[in-house]
Amino acid sequence: MLKVAFICVHNSCRSQIAEALCNHLAGDIFEAYSAGTETKPQINQDAVRLMKQLYGIDMEKTQYSKLLSDIPPVDIVITMGCNVECPFLPCKYREDWGLDDPTGKSDEEFIKTISLIEQKIYEMKTKSSSFV
């Protein structure tokens, strides 16, 4: 099973959504983690609410804000597009998804971001054999 890390500065919104969706939609291929260079006391509550509403996933039961040092070595690193210099994390494959942070925006913006993450996870799943 390939280990994938979704990396964002605060590990509170986009990377948490990606971890939850990857484990939900592609858990047969990927073991997903999320982490950041800083942490927040809790996962973004709009993300928690919408993920529960849309997918029945309760991120607060299975996830928490983590630092890069809190996750195991990974095969794939996906950065969310934080417009900062991402720290080096050893991996076989790296990609930046360039996603805007929906924090503080409308539910529609959150749902757009969640849908983009879902689409990118399905794309990643279809090309998973090329990551080995």
Image: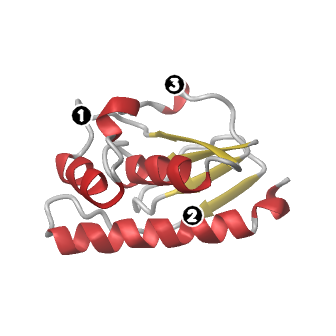
Return the x and y of residue 80 as percentages of the image width and height: 46, 59
Residue sitting at x 25%, y 47%: 48
Residue 68 position, x and y percent, is 51, 33
Q: Is residue 62 left or right of residue 22?
A: left
Q: Earlier in the sequence, mark 3 or mark 1?
A: 1
Q: Residue at x 68, y 48 (%)?
A: 28
**Residue 112 visible in image:** yes
User: Horizontal placement of 92 versus 51: left or right?
Assistant: right
User: Few, some or many C-alpha atoms within 10 Å of disc 1 (few <14, some 14-19, many ≥20)?
Assistant: some
Q: Type of residue at label 2?
A: Ile
At label 1, which amino acid type do we have? Gln
Nearer the observer: mark 3 or 2; the answer is 2
- Which residue has dot 2 on it? 121
Q: Which mark is residue 22?
A: none
Q: Earlier in the sequence, mark 2 or mark 1?
A: 1
Residue 113's place in the image compared with 54, above or below, is below
Please report contact status of discs 3 and 2: CB closer than 8 Å, yes or no.
Answer: no
Outermost residue toward the front in this view:
56
Task: Using the image, tell me which numbered label, if any, was put on residue 42.
Answer: 1
Query: How many C-alpha atoms fall within 10 Å of the one at disc 3: few (<14), some, or many (≥20)?
Result: few
Residue placed under numbered mark 3 in the picture: 70
State the CA–CA distance, disc 3 to disc 2: 23 Å
